[in-house]
Image (cartoon, coloured by chain):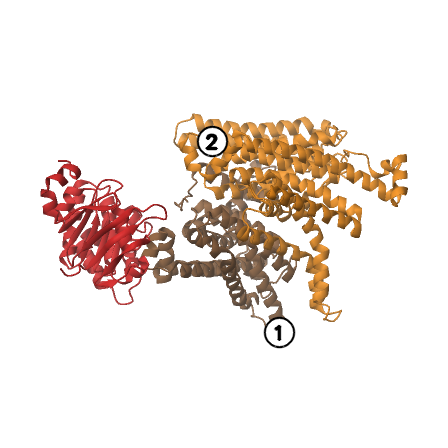
Chain colours: A orange, B brown, C red
Amino acid sequence: MSVNLRNVALFAAMALALLMTGMFQSWSLALTILNMSLISAVMALGVNIQWGYAGLFNVGVMGFTAFGGLAAVLVAMPPTEGAWAAGGPRVILGLALGAASILAAIAVWQRLPRGKLRVAALIAVLVAGYVITRMVFAPAADAISQVNPATQGFLGGLGLPVILSWPVGALFAGGLAWVVGKVALGLRSDYLAIATLGISEIVIAVLKFESWMSRGVNNVSGIPRALPRPVEWQGYDWVQSLAVTLGFTTNQMASIVEKLGYAILFAIVLGLLIWLSEKALNAPWGRMMRAIRDNETAARAMGKDVTRRHLMVFVLGSGVCGLAGAMMVSLDGQMTPGSYEPLRYTFLIWVMVIVGGSGNNWGAVLGGFIIWFLWVQAEPAGRWLMDNLTAGMADDSALRTHLLTQAAHMRLIMMGLALLLMLRFAPRGLIPER
Amino acid sequence: MDPVSAFILLSNFVVIPALAYGSQLALGALGITLIYGILRFSHFAHGDIMAFGTAVVILTTWALQGFGISFGVLPTALLALPVGIVATILYLLAADRTVYRFYRKVRAKPMILVMASLGVMFVTNGLTRLLIGPGQQRFDDGTRFVFSVRDFREWTGLSEGLALRSSQFLTLIVALVAMALLFWFLNRTRGGKSMRAYSDNEDLALLSGINPERVVVITWAIAGTLMVLAGTLYGLDKSFRPFTYFQLLLPFFAAAILGGLGNPLGAIVGAYVVAFSEMGITYAWRRFFEHLLPESWAPDGMLQILPVDYKFAVTFAILVLVLIFRPTGIFRGKSV
Amino acid sequence: MADPFLIGEAMTGGYGGADILHACTIAVNKGEIAVIVGPNGAGKSTAMKAVFGMLKLREGHVRLAGEDITALTPQARVAKGMGFVPQNNNIFPSMSVEENLQMGAFIRTDDFSGTMEQVYDLFPILREKRRQAAGELSGGQRQQVAVGRALMTKPSVLMLDEPTAGVSPIVMDELFDRIIEVARTGISILMVEQNARQALEIADKGYVLVQGQNRFTDTGQALLADPEVRKSFLGG
């Protein structure tokens, strides 16, 4: 009981911090933090499923998140007029040919007997597959990029409601995880870490470079919203009257209502995920996973196919990260491949899980909230700290200006210290595993 | 048909750059593999600590330049190297004392140590940015070329040109000397042998009276030196940017795994394989084949297998192939 | 009777949990061979590890040449002149034979080339293969490297944990011959053996342990002749 009270108190403190932000800074900021906290919590849940349940070390969260985000573009953007005609089917055919040549290569490797012939055949299949794929694919991709390049130059999407992209994003990320897991699971545990690190860099490179798909570094903006925009909310009478009652301008009120709306949507998703995770964790499946995590050799000896189970957990966890990625892109209304960096999208999530409590879903959620809050608030706090620390220096002191401009980086140090201190002194996190 | 031109072209755009890049990777991958062999975890802070050490070198270089000190035809950064190396070694030892030693004592799982190295990575990342900012820095001075394309054309009278930049030449020399010294140390000295013994069989090393803490200190010192060398040479050759250095982690690991984790010779071979693959696969081979083939066969396309943006994909593909076909690496590494 | 050269007296203890040894006594005289035999799980290896300080004793003492060394770490015991050859992982596989021997002499600050020559004389095959990686040698040769490594500190006592585990009978005989030779140079030998009959044949003293307690203690020959020992432990 006391533990439960403690957990409730921790969440209450978190809510209080957000309320204080609303009262002393602005409600809009508080809600922005809340929304990203909810998304972060979903990502942390995904990582927790992998690390907390199964001890899998995924340092490619960024890649799975970004890949899930791509789903928002492909599902919700209206199809680009003329782009499909210019090269749509050919691009798809090209991708299919690429996949087919890889499958053919695998088949060759598995079917043929060992020896030089097999190697030669493998190389021949790969080279031929590459050449054919390239011949079909490259001109089509170019043709698409030529369609109205200033604002479009990509295939666009299916024009479906953006919410649909959330499960699709999960599927995207899960599918990618299946491929990565097939290769890297069942080997030494560090190998998965390095493989995921690699795949995440590649996903970002693909998003940046394959402009026919994602417009690359030109970004996709104007992704259809899940909820009406603030301008539309302003038209509602109840928004206007609420603004008067609460003492906001209509503008502010509309923006708050919009953000609240997203908060509710995200909270529903998060709640659903927690419910499912808790169910799974306490079901025989969850107990088996933890048994495998705690003693892999024993589990193997009992006849459990550990690698298969790991693959399943890895796919599930990555899928949740992809879901979060799609949610994030639909909240932002844009896809900006250049903004994905591993510190923010991979390693920060890890800090959330470790600080919150690995193996505990509520812990991961709490970690997501706290760390995101600190991450946002550390920037002004760091600047304020530096300002005071250097107050004795002359205003035009080079060192002072340098320190002030770089103060934002203080939060990296802070996050690192949080991770190290928790790992050392409270390795089970704020809300430990039961 | 003009094979000489083809050869010179290839040397200029693939062989020399790949040798330089491969040497820089080798220095980093050696650090990864040594740390893995002795401390038995994958050191994820490697790229960022390399950035930290290089930042110290750059700041020292600027200070030296501010005092009007230069190193003649050689880059001033070489004079600043010792400062960077000492700072990095002290930093690594401090990290070991405050972070890693505890987990070693309690014999924590390797994954926990990896996690701790993520924390160190974060802190180092912030420190480096506080020191020098996240932006790109150039700090090369001295002569730019050992010989330039024009020099080469004048000497040889050939149509294709070949240049050797000082930074590339310097990289090759420094890396060669560093590797030779490292192998001399590992194979010929008491300290080096105790490191190999500890990596081979920890318990027996303890029994033989080898002091583990000493071995650990030597390992960090060597890894730190190699990191700063790699970072400075890479920065002179290309440019310095903290994030780029973080991203080097992937080719470092790919090289070390390819060569067999814990195997220094393997790390070097792996580094050159990664470098040559990256360069070869992202190079546009059209002109090379124009020189080699009769005119009527001249290719239409660029003959570039993958765009440069996908150089990570090349590294990753190598990694995947190793993981599928030979997880212990070409030379057998430790399989923990 | 004078105190034996090395004695673990009334040792009681285990690895944290329940005691494995119960007032167990093991001793060896100067230049003699003492062998510990007994059924599986009798605590043979544990008794030897206790003598070497690899397990904490709750009761009892270990004395070497009259000096109480109960509180010393294994490393400190090596410095005092005890050599130990573990059963598994007893070589540095990627290092050459010669480097293995050098590592054995790591704590020595004097010139150890003479000792290395003695080891090579004792195991001529090692001289032949001294540049080869120890991990590439055959099982019997690896055991020779392991024993050679332990001899490099010029120990006064050599402790061997099942030196013949996993080697062929011919190699086993040869190893035993070498061990007798080592003992003739004045080094006391304490060893745990699975092959009880052959080991007792070369033993000056034999200890039969059962469940962490001394069951029979006598000269090797007397134990071999004892009908009860033969029946229970030597298979008739």
Pointer 2 residue? A122
What x and y, as percent, mark residue C34? 17, 51
Residue A268 picture quarter: top right
Quadrant in the rendering for residue B297: top right
| Label number found at residue B68 | 1
Placement of B307 over or under A404, stated as above or below: above
The amino acid type found where label 1 is placed reads Gly
- Mark 2: which amino acid? Leu
Secondary structure type for disc 1: loop
Subunit under mark 2: A
Side (left or right) of A365 relative to B155: right
Q: x, y (%) of residue C203? A: 14, 49
The answer to whether one can see residue B212 in this image is yes
Q: Chain of mark 1?
A: B
Q: In percent of the image, x 87 and y 39: which residue is there?
A: A242
Which is nearer the eye, B55 or A119?
A: B55
- Label 2: how many Cα within 10 Å (few below 14, some 14–19, many 20+): many
